[in-house]
Structures are given as structure tokens and as C-alpha cells.
Image: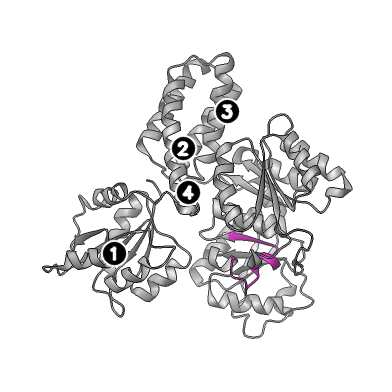
């Protein structure tokens, strides 16, 4: 249940502040809106599992907004709990008639509030429609936790030897790669430590491995995902970005300060270029090595059109964007940007993307592919859950997917099927992903193939090597599934708007 998305719609700042504090401290991903108009804006890029809906909203009231949300395919399955400060006879029946799943009265009881929210989340079973990525994610989380509980119990009682040791290492690797992706980052961190212990076999490792699986079982049982401290900035980022000049476009003062702080860590200078949409000229960009443009704001979107209007622009543009903006066909962000980072962004990932795109030119407008009815992607990973997660999401976007479970299958699929893109895990059995990449790039017929490499965080140093060998892009496990799908879509010959 950790990191379940929740939206609070309430025009009372004190109520919002208290509810948000309690829910955030309990591990939920919380957004807020003060009225119906603001709620609809938030919902354009955020899909909550539960909505706390104040009935007495200014403008469109909470019950009318609830009826509207029940008619929308994205929010019709969200849990909506009506909240009111003036409980009157019949209010609960009106709330349920409008489509609310429950009813609460203000003031909230801080001792029981979080447990009430958890009861609603547990009580309302998610729709099992696997075509909806949110429903699919919930199904995969439940499966991941159930399998993790059973495997951790079994291995906690086993002797780490022979074939059993190989199975232990494989399941720990699976947990490390998928835990954070499914919303359980603490499981990822502890599983990574366990995997390294099994691989390195330090002193007393035979005694420590069963203890490690016992701790994993406790994590699975608690369904927790407490945040962990970000590691320090890697030295190669400092070396690559030191003294670079970065121009910021479309950021509000607080976000601009956050971006500057990130680049300060690598001794780069980031400057806010102001309202560039009011007459953007090449002189404003020429002195910068990189432009970071925030497509989440109206100012950023206007500036994006101004950037595209520059026929001689040779500076790379790194976008900070929402999912909805990236998929807006009128903006053509996926087709023209050098690279992107999704909100909410991570400082190290922003710097890694910046390191990768410095020196690149803006992407040319991509032509439509004529050779195939729809794009084909080969998904090469030995983790079955990766295929279960990504394949239906890509198919829903109109992409044909061929699965490969080891390096040899990946090479055979590329040679026989001639796909538009290859998603390739570095840690593949039989033939490693790095060897597959090198072998494919030796063949001139594969030079145009778009290859996205998947790695776990310990393999992050391999990313630079993969890019040097000819990889087009990368993603680090645990990843955001929707963000990864967007990265894959960006590599395809057909613009995202046509899919």
C-alpha cells in the first residue's frame, strides 16, 4: 500500500495541510486541489487510487465533480470518499448516489484518520481489467508481494548451498529490479544488499543469508516502502558537466532553484533565461551548452514552440515534462526533444540525462514509417514480470511486441524480424546484453536499430560503456513503467501521436 496515490480536494488550507501531513508521513503519494477546476488540472497528469472529496467546494460542488469523474474512463474506478464539515441527514445517501464509496465528517481524528483511509483502500477491490496500466500495476504488486512472502519464507529456512544458492541469487536479483518499480523501494534496497552478499560471500555469509531472507519476509509482510537517501553524485557526472553553462526555461522560482542546486553539485552553472516565449532569439541560447525546458508550465510550452521555430538552433534541449504533455501530439515533444525527464524528477537522473545530451543537436522531425503497419519492439529480459508489465502497455499503444528471454533469442529476433527497436537488459543469461549490443552493432544492417538498455543501479557504470558501444537510450531498474514506455515510443519511427 506504500506510495498509493491520493488526491485531496478541499478549499480549507488548514484541513489540507493536516490531511496531507498525516498521509505523506504514512507513505502515500499525495496531491491537493482547492476547487473542482484545479482538481481537473491535477487529474490531467495524476491518477489517484483514492480521492478525498470535500462536498462544499466553491463553484462546482464536490458531488457534481464526483458524478463527472465517474463518467471519465481514467477516474471511474478511483475510490472517492466524501468529506463534509456540516453533516446533515441524507448527506451520506446523496454522496453514495453521486458515486462516492464512503463518507467522513470533519474535523478528522488524527489518531484514526490514516487507518480509515487504509480501510477504504483495502475494502474497495481494484478492477481486474489488465488493459488499464493502473489496474495492471495493482495486480502485479499483489502478485509480487505474495510470491515474495512465500520465497523469502522458504529460503529463510534453507541452507545456502549448491543449486539452492543460485535460486537465492536469482530471486534476490528479481526483487532488486522490480521492488522499486512496483512501489516498494525498501525491498529493492535490501534485496540488492542480499544479492551482493550471495555473490561476494563475505565472512559468515552462510549464517547471514538466511537472516537476510528473514528480513525480506518482514518487509514483504509489512507492505512498506520507506524512502532511502540518494547516493552521492557519481564522479563521472562531475567530470562531464563541470563548468557547463545551462539555460533554464519555463521554471517557477522554486523549481529553478532546485535545478540550480542539482547542477551546483557537478560545478555547472544554471541560469534562468526568463520569458523566452516573448521573442526568443539565438543570442539567448548561444552561450549555453544545454537548455533545460519545463514543459509542465504554460510558459515552458510557449517557449518550446519558440525553440522549434529557430531554424539554426544547435543547442540540445532536455525536457522536464508531465506524461500528458509528452503524449500531446500538438507539442511533438517525443518526436523533437533530445531527451526528457518526467515529473517528479530525481536530481541524479536529471544530471545523468544532461551528461548524455550535452553536445547533441536537436532531433529532426521524424518521418512516418511506410514499411510496416505498426511498429515492432523486441523486449529482451529474463524477468517474466518485466514482460507481464510492459507488453500490455505497449500493445495498448499500438506496438507489436516480441519477447526474448536470453541474449541468443534477442539476436535471433533482431536478425529474423527486423524490429524498429530493441529493449535489452544488460544482465541477460547465455549471452550478456552488452555482448548482444556489440555483436549487433558490428553488422551494418543493424546500425539504424534503436536500442534501449536496461540496467540495475549497481550496473550504472555500464551505461557509459553501452552508450559508447552504440546504445540509443537507457533506463535504470527499478523504473517507472509509464516513463519507460514513453522512452520506447520515442525511439519508434512513427510519432507518438499516430499510435
Q: Label 3 to label 2, Cα distance in Å?
A: 15 Å
Q: Label 1 to label 2, Cα distance in Å?
A: 31 Å
- Colour mapping used in the image: one colour
Mark in front: 1 vs 2: 1
Mark 2 or mark 4, which has the lower sequence index? 4
Q: Secondary structure at mark 1?
A: loop
Mark in front: 2 vs 4: 4
Q: What residue sits 39% from the left and 51% below the top?
A: 127
Q: What residue sits 70% from the left and 52% below the top?
A: 376
The residue where tag 2 is placed is: 144
The residue where tag 3 is placed is: 170
Q: Label 3 to label 1, Cα distance in Å?
A: 45 Å
The residue where tag 1 is placed is: 99
* Magenta-colored span: 327-341
Residue lying furthest left = 89
Name the spot of residue 463 as percent of width and height, x first: 70, 45
In this rendering, would 172 be left or right of 242? left
Mark in front: 3 vs 1: 1
- Answer yes or no: is residue 322 visible: no
Mark 3 or mark 1, which has the lower sequence index? 1
Q: Quadrant of residue 304?
A: bottom right
Mark 1 or mark 4, which has the lower sequence index? 1
Q: Secondary structure at mark 2?
A: helix
Neighbourhood count class around disc 1 (C-alpha, 10 Å): few under 14, some 14–19, many 20 upward: many
Mark 4 or mark 3, which has the lower sequence index? 4
Name the spot of residue 293 as percent of width and height, x first: 62, 69
Amino acid at each position: 500500500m506504500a506510495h498509493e496515490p491520493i488526491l485531496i480536494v478541499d478549499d480549507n488550507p488548514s484541513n489540507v495541510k493536516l490531511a496531507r501531513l498525516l498521509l505523506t508521513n504514512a507513505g502515500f503519494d499525495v496531491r491537493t486541489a482547492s476547487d473542482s477546476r484545479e482538481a481537473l488540472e491535477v487529474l490531467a497528469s495524476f491518477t489517484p487510487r483514492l480521492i478525498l472529496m470535500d462536498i462544499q467546494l466553491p463553484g462546482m460542488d464536490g458531488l457534481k465533480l464526483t458524478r463527472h469523474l465517474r463518467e471519465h474512463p481514467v477516474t471511474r474506478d478511483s475510490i472517492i470518499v466524501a468529506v463534509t464539515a456540516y453533516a446533515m441527514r441524507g448527506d451520506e445517501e446523496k454522496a453514495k448516489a453521486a458515486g462516492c464509496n464512503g463518507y467522513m465528517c470533519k474535523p478528522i481524528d488524527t489518531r484514526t484518520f490514516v487507518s480509515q483511509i487504509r480501510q477504504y483502500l483495502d475494502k474497495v477491490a481494484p478492477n481486474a481489467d489488465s488493459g488499464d496500466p493502473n489496474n495492471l500495476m495493482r495486480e502485479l504488486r499483489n502478485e509480487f508481494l505474495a510470491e515474495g512472502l512465500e520465497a523469502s519464507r522458504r529460503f529463510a529456512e534453507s541452507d545456502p548451498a549448491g543449486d539452492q544458492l543460485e535460486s537465492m541469487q536469482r530471486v534476490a536479483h528479481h526483487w532488486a529490479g522490480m521492488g522499486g518499480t512496483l512501489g516498494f523501494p525498501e525491498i529493492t534496497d535490501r534485496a540488492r544488499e542480499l544479492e551482493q552478499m550471495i555473490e561476494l560471500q563475505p565472512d559468515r555469509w552462510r549464517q547471514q543469508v538466511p537472516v537476510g531472507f528473514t528480513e525480506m519476509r518482514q518487509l514483504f509482510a509489512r507492505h512498506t516502502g520507506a524512502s532511502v537517501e540518494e547516493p552521492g553524485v557519481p564522479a563521472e557526472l562531475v567530470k562531464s558537466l563541470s563548468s557547463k553553462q545551462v539555460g533554464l526555461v519555463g521554471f517557477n522560482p522554486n523549481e529553478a532553484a532546485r535545478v540550480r542546486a542539482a547542477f551546483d553539485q557537478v560545478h555547472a552553472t544554471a541560469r534562468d533565461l526568463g520569458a523566452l516565449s516573448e521573442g526568443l532569439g539565438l543570442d539567448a541560447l548561444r552561450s549555453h551548452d544545454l537548455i533545460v525546458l519545463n514543459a509542465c508550465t504554460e510558459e515552458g510550452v510557449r517557449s518550446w514552440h519558440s525553440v522549434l521555430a529557430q531554424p539554426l538552433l544547435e543547442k540540445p534541449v532536455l525536457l522536464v515534462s508531465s506524461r500528458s504533455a509528452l503524449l500531446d501530439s500538438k507539442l511533438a515533444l517525443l518526436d523533437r526533444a533530445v531527451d526528457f525527464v518526467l515529473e517528479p524528477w530525481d536530481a541524479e537522473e536529471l544530471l545523468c540525462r544532461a551528461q548524455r545530451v550535452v553536445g547533441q543537436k536537436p532531433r529532426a522531425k521524424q518521418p512516418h514509417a511506410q514499411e510496416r503497419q505498426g511498429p515492432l519492439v523486441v523486449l529482451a529480459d529474463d524477468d517474466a514480470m518485466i514482460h507481464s508489465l510492459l507488453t500490455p502497455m505497449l500493445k495498448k499503444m499500438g506496438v507489436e511486441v516480441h519477447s526474448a528471454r536470453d541474449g541468443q533469442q534477442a539476436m535471433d529476433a533482431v536478425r529474423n524480424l527486423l524490429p524498429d527497436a530493441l529493449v535489452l537488459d544488460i544482465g541477460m543469461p547465455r549471452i550478456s546484453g552488452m555482448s548482444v549490443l556489440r555483436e549487433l552493432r558490428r553488422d551494418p544492417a543493424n546500425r539504424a536499430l534503436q536500442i534501449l538498455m536496461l540496467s540495475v543501479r549497481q550496473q550504472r557504470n555500464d551505461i557509459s560503456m553501452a552508450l559508447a558501444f552504440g546504445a540509443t537510450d537507457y533506463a535504470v531498474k527499478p523504473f517507472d513503467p509509464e516513463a519507460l514506455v514513453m522512452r520506447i515510443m520515442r525511439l519508434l519511427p512513427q510519432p507518438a501521436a499516430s499510435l
